[in-house]
Amino acid sequence: MSNSLNPDDGLDYIFARMSAIFGAAFTRHWDGIDPNLIRQEWKRQLGNFLTYQPSLDYAIDRLNGEFVPSAIKFRDFCNAGPAIPRDEPQITYNPTPVSPEVVAEAKRKLAELKKQYEP
């Protein structure tokens, strides 16, 4: 199973889990606030954390269950958790062997250059 989510799925995931933890207090917490505005702000605050489930799980596991966290507090919990892996390829050094003829020619040219600058 992959740990990667798209941001909307990540937000749905944490809101579903927090609804299970906090019950009706979770939905009452947002009374009178446009749900789209809530989602927009949480997405803005959490950013890439919404794409990595282990960060979300780490943050949810740190909730004390007494108070619904703010988006900023939840982000702080995510920040303290596991790092989001980078998709960038790792650079490895794998030199191509140089033929002895090329090495010999380079040494010859270097010797010629040295002669030009010797007193």
Image (tube, grey):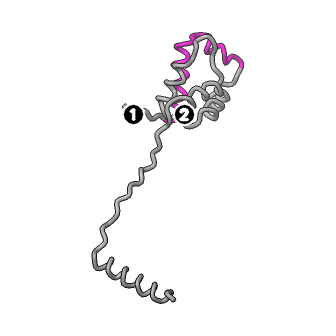
Residue 9 lies within the magenta run: yes
Q: Which residue is mark 2?
A: 49
- N-terminal label among 2 and 1: 1
- Magenta stretch, overall SS: helix
Q: Secondary structure at mark 1?
A: loop
Relative to the observer, which residue lies in front, 16 or 3?
3
The residue at the point 42 percent across, 87 percent down is 112
Residue 4, horizontal then vertical, whole percent: 45, 35
40 sits left or right of 115 in the view = right
| Residues in magenta, as a range | 6-32
Q: Is residue 61 above or below residue 78?
A: above
Instruction: Classify 10 Å Cα crowding around label 1: few (below 14), some (14-19), many (20 and above).
Output: few
Q: Quadrant of residue 38?
A: top right
Residue 63, horizontal then vertical, whole percent: 57, 17
Q: Quadrant of residue 105?
A: bottom left
Residue 31, horizontal then vertical, whole percent: 69, 16
The residue at the point 60 percent across, 32 percent down is 46
Relative to the observer, which residue lies in front, 71 or 80?
80
Instruction: Classify 10 Å Cα crowding around label 2: few (below 14), some (14-19), many (20 and above).
Output: many
Residue 84 lies within the magenta run: no
Q: Is residue 111 above or below residue 52?
A: below
At label 2, which amino acid type do we have?
Phe
Residue 72, horizontal then vertical, whole percent: 65, 27
As drawn, the label of residue 2 is 1
